[in-house]
Amino acid sequence: MPRALVTGASGGIGAAICQALARRGVCLVLHYQQGRAAAERTLQSLDGSGHELLQADLGDAAAIEQLWRTASEQAQVDVLINNAGIFPDHPPLSSSYPQWTAAWQRTLAVNLIGAAHLSYCAARSMSEQPGGGRIVSVSSRGAFRGEPSAPAYAASKAGLNAFSQSLAKALAARAVYVFVVAPGWVATTRVAAKVQEPAVLAEQPLGRVATAEEVAGVVSFCALEAPASMTGAILDVNGASYLRS
């Protein structure tokens, strides 16, 4: 039975990823930073048994190392899903300098540096274990089109894309494969009202935004089925709302 660590697993896309993987027989370690009650609800919704919860602040390098150590001490972790992320608004023309600097420091710490540190721990471990492993990171279309009210978020996701492709090159020979899934708007409870706004719907050729289950399906494919030759790929899941070539 494969074993996966999913960050930001308490709700939204993270919960859907856990549910999709559990249905495939994966044993899960669910990470959360805050909101243990929501993480418990996700845990209770999962098929199978042997799943567990672990708390850690992904802005803390020492906590990240301990998270990986604890997650892998009972059994090897075959898959890492870097899903956790934050999106604080900090428009450049209306944010104070303290607000601006705080948003940049915290966003990069969690979305990019935290994911990089955890991926480092995973890469070192997976490269030594039979069968290698897989690292899947959840990015954003914002990495390509920009986010004017949250530029640190866009920069963090662009950095995550570049980091993941660097990692794919570094680890391919050790059978550790790296993928990125880049959604646009996703219908989750947190943004339920926003995704129904006319301005958001107007840019959706499908007439709706993606569901968390659709994103989770692509993540699950990368975690379990994608061929080795796809390592380094960035897969868009934005309903053709932003196209690149």
Image (tube, grey):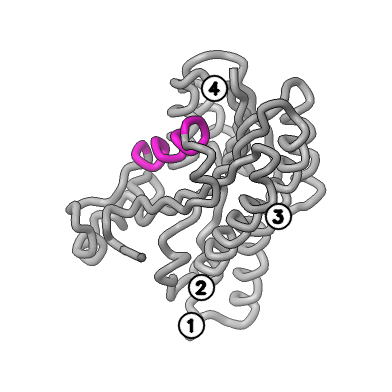
Q: Which residues are magenta?
A: 213-225
Q: Earlier in the sequence, mark 4 or mark 1?
A: 4
Q: Position of residue 233 (x, y in %)?
A: 49, 51
Q: Which disc number belongs to residue 152?
A: none
Q: Residue furthest bottom?
A: 93
Q: Position of residue 76 (x, y in %)?
A: 72, 25
Q: Which disc number belongs to residue 59?
A: 3
Relative side of 131 to 231, left or right: right
- Image depth: mark 2 or mark 4 in front: 4
Real-space CA distance between mark 4 and mark 1, rounded to the nearest whole angstrom: 45 Å
Q: Earlier in the sequence, mark 3 or mark 2?
A: 3
- Image depth: mark 3 or mark 1 in front: 3
Q: Position of residue 71 (x, y in %)?
A: 72, 30
Real-space CA distance between mark 3 and mark 1, rounded to the nearest whole angstrom: 26 Å
Real-space CA distance between mark 2 and mark 1, rounded to the nearest whole angstrom: 13 Å
- Image depth: mark 4 or mark 3 in front: 4
Which residue type carries mark 2? Answer: Pro
Q: Earlier in the sequence, mark 2 or mark 4?
A: 4
**Which corner quadrant holds the C terminus?**
bottom left
Q: Earlier in the sequence, mark 4 or mark 3?
A: 4
CB atoms of marks 4 and 1 within 8 Å: no
Please say whether residue 137 is one of the residues in the magenta stretch: no
Which residue type carries mark 3? Answer: Gly
| Residue that badge 4 annotates | 26
| Residue that badge 1 annotates | 94
